[in-house]
Amino acid sequence: MQITLEGHGEPVPVEPGDTILGSLLRAGVPFPFSCQAGNCGTCKCELVAGEVLELEHSEHALSREERAKGVILACRSQVWEDTVVRRIDAEDLVMHPSRVMRCRVLELEQLTHDIKGVRLAIEAGGPFNFSAGQYAQLEFAPGLSRHYSMANTPGAPELVFHIRHMPGGRTSGYVAAELKPGDKVKVSGPLGVAYLRERHAGPVLLIAGGSGLAPIQSILCTLLEGGHEAPVTLYFGVRSERDLYHEQLLEDLAARHPNFSCHVILSEQKGARGRRYGLVHEAVASDLESSEGVMAYLAGPPVMVEAASALLSARGLAPRQIHADAFYDQT
């Protein structure tokens, strides 16, 4: 049996019951992936020919509508006959060299009561090329590793992450209580496909929840620094005032760039400083007058990402216009 990836060339041999992703990676074929558990949607592809057995996966990663159109998850699709697949949005596919780097903690900043900013210097294994919106795996000690998004722009000399302390989380608990300047951190990546589509010149909608601001901030600053002229609108949802951070940065960006506007939404603290109250996707729903030509980027808790994605789909945005990374199991 074999798998043919359109645009790659030679078919890849596959053993019965192997997944599409596993077979492609073993053969050295570059293919986007992340969680390998059917949660993130990074490895979506189109099934052109053949039949596969689809294993359990999250509906956030692959909706019923997408499945009806022949879209599958390479990591959750077992092959039992000759199969042909096609990458989704191949014209937008960006593949950066994979790096495993030794980094050093330069600075820790308490951004909120439960989010720390972690700034790293790359000491070995670089350079680290990535697209705004991508993430990496950070290993602080053996058995203590998780995926976190880069908050800095590509090309910046240092890496910056926003790490929220999750109750009971071993890795985030270590960062909150034990990590200190000078400590070594192994960084592997880049990962993720919810990155900035730099060829898009139209309106951009950004939706962030909590520490999901990290990849959205990278996308926002890359857009504005690159001279993007169309409207860029950010909706930043947090629970209360104490969960809000980098507001001054966002206000400064809005002052310097007339095409950028920012809306802060509080979900649990009504009436605080006159701010808008409610769920962030509801605020988007009340404001969004037209979805024509919009490219949307979302990051944050799964429930927020799923609700916002469903809203945007209902408002007419195609899957290729909605790019999202939900923060699953970020402990």
Image (cartoon, rainbow, N blue to C red):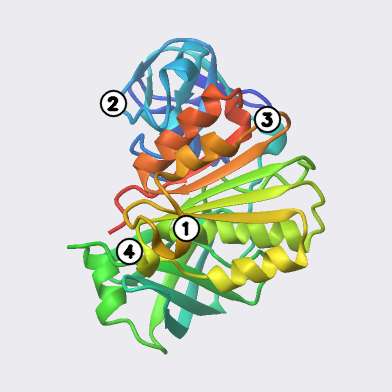
The CA span between labels 3 and 4 is 41 Å
Residue at label 3? Answer: 290
Q: Residues within 10 Å of mark 4 (few under 14, many from 20)?
A: some
Seen from the viewer's position, the closer of residues 97 and 63 is 63
Counting residues from the start of the chain, the first of labels 3 and 1 encountered is 1
The CA span between labels 3 and 1 is 24 Å
Residue kind at label 3, given as amino acid type: Ser
For the N terminus, give its image quadrant: top left
Residue kind at label 4, given as amino acid type: Ser
The CA span between labels 4 and 1 is 36 Å
* Farthest-out residue, bottom: 182
Q: Residues within 10 Å of mark 1 (few under 14, many from 20)?
A: some
The x, y position of residue 267, in whole percent, is 36, 51
Counting residues from the start of the chain, the first of labels 4 and 2 encountered is 2
Contact? badges 3 and 1 (CB < 8 Å) = no
Q: Residues within 10 Å of mark 2 (few under 14, many from 20)?
A: few
Q: Residue at x 44, y 75 (%)?
A: 117
The CA span between labels 2 and 1 is 41 Å
Residue at label 1? Answer: 275
Q: Nearer the viewer, mark 2 or mark 1?
A: 1
Residue kind at label 2, given as amino acid type: Glu
The CA span between labels 4 and 2 is 25 Å
The x, y position of residue 200, in whole percent, is 76, 41
Seen from the viewer's position, the closer of residues 240 and 76 is 240
Q: Residue at x 67, y 62 (%)?
A: 221
Residue at label 4? Answer: 145
Q: Residue at x 41, y 75 (%)?
A: 185
For the C terminus, give its image quadrant: bottom left
Seen from the viewer's position, the closer of residues 115 and 185 is 115
